[in-house]
Image (spheres, rainbow, N blue to C red):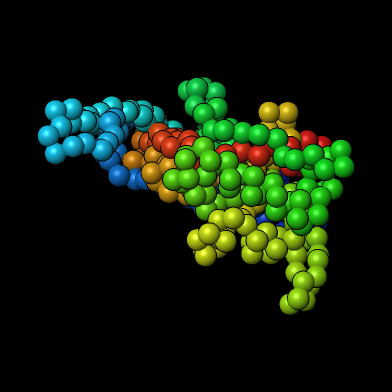
């Protein structure tokens, strides 16, 4: 037992009961697919993707039966490109660690492998939401090409914590209307993402109507311009990355049509586990990789930001 204790990598206090369960620290989920359409098409090892943008110039006009001035139009085609890059995380172990873990019922290699997979998913999520300064990209919550405006000021405040249901709904409709007007009434935003504190403020504020007591959030879901015109429900959810995404570091509302034509998260190579590499006589390494292009916004007119709907997080 003395030899085993000396070899054991973790110091266990004597005289204490050792619990069988190992408690893993909880982290936020990396559910980027809940907010951005994920596109996995394309060659996993490709350097990027390219696509064509078609437009048309010209217009019809009234002419006579003997007209010599027929109006002619012309189609135009532009080529767009978007690059991919690779992310990865690994783990390593030795014969010593494997055998020490076996003595105490701990699969250290499995734990490290799961954590490396989580590291990759965390990075993919962060790139999808906010981009990466390292490769000079932005994401869903901070794109410079998306139109933005501040929330309406009511009683000296723009924050939802100080607004009633009608005032909150007015901010949502301002975002929806911005998309309609900026796209010449072509686009409709069907998705709203809110800072968690603003979402909770709307969820907790109660009001009464003919049917009884409802929350301000439910009121907004029923009474918004998108639902009124299309009859379809508005997708409203919280997104933690919006809590400090505004230009002044406060909360930002993101309004957009959730469709790959508008925005997409490129993931040509989802998470892939590499073969075991023998780095030494008793030393092994392994890794997880993925290839992504991050978030690409192709139709910025189908998106809008409404800033300062919640205070700067403390």
Which residue is located at x 49 percent, y 49 percent? 188
Q: Is residue 225 above or below residue 304?
A: below
Q: Quadrant of the C terminus?
A: top right
- Residue found farthest to the right: 155
Q: Residue at x 47, y 40 (%)?
A: 184
Q: Residue at x 34, y 45 (%)?
A: 40
Q: Residue at x 73, y 51 (%)?
A: 168
Task: Say if residue 218 shows up in the picture.
Answer: yes
Q: Is residue 201 above or below residue 87?
A: below
Q: Is residue 34 above or below residue 55?
A: below
Residue 222: x %, y % from top left: 64, 64
Q: Nearer the viewer, residue 58 or 296?
A: 58
Q: Is residue 47 left or right of residue 138?
A: left
Relative to 281, 211 lies left or right: right
Q: Nearer the viewer, residue 110 or 288?
A: 288
Residue 231: image x %, image y %? 52, 65
- Outermost residue, bottom direction? 211
174 left or right of 182 in image: right
Residue 22, horizontal then vertical, whole percent: 65, 56
Tally of marks: 0
Q: Residue 109: in sight, yes or no?
A: no
Residue 77: x %, y % from top left: 25, 29
Residue sitting nearer the eye, 56 or 38: 56
């Amino acid at each position: 037992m003395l030899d085993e204790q000396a070899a054991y990598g973790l110091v266990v206090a004597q005289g204490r009961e050792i619990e069988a369960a190992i408690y893993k620290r909880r982290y936020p989920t990396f559910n980027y697919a809940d907010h951005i359409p994920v596109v996995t098409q394309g060659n996993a090892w490709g350097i990027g993707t390219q696509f064509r943008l078609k437009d048309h110039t010209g217009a019809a006009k009234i002419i006579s039966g003997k007209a010599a001035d027929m109006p002619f139009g012309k189609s135009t085609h532009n080529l767009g490109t978007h690059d991919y890059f690779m992310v990865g995380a690994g783990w390593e172990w030795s014969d010593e660690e494997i055998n020490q873990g076996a003595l105490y019922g701990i699969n250290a290699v499995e734990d490290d492998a799961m954590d490396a997979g989580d590291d990759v998913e965390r990075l993919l999520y962060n790139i999808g939401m906010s981009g990466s300064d390292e490769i000079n990209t932005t994401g869903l919550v901070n794109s410079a090409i998306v139109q933005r405006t501040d929330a309406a000021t009511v009683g000296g405040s723009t924050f939802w914590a100080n607004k009633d249901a009608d005032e909150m709904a007015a901010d949502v409709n301002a975002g929806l209307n911005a998309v309609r007007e900026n796209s010449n009434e072509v686009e409709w935003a069907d998705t709203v993402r809110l800072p968690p504190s603003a979402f909770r403020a709307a969820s907790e504020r109660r009001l009464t109507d003919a049917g009884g007591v409802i929350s301000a959030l439910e009121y907004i879901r029923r009474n918004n311009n998108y639902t009124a015109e299309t009859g379809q429900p508005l997708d409203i959810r919280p997104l933690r990355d919006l809590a400090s995404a505004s230009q002044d570091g406060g909360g930002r509302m993101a309004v957009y049509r959730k469709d790959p034509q508008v925005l997409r998260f490129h993931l040509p190579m989802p998470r892939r586990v590499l073969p075991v590499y023998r780095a030494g006589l008793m030393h092994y390494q392994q890794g997880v990789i993925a290839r992504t292009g991050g978030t690409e916004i192709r139709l910025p007119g189908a998106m809008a930001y409404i800033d300062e709907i919640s205070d700067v997080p403390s």
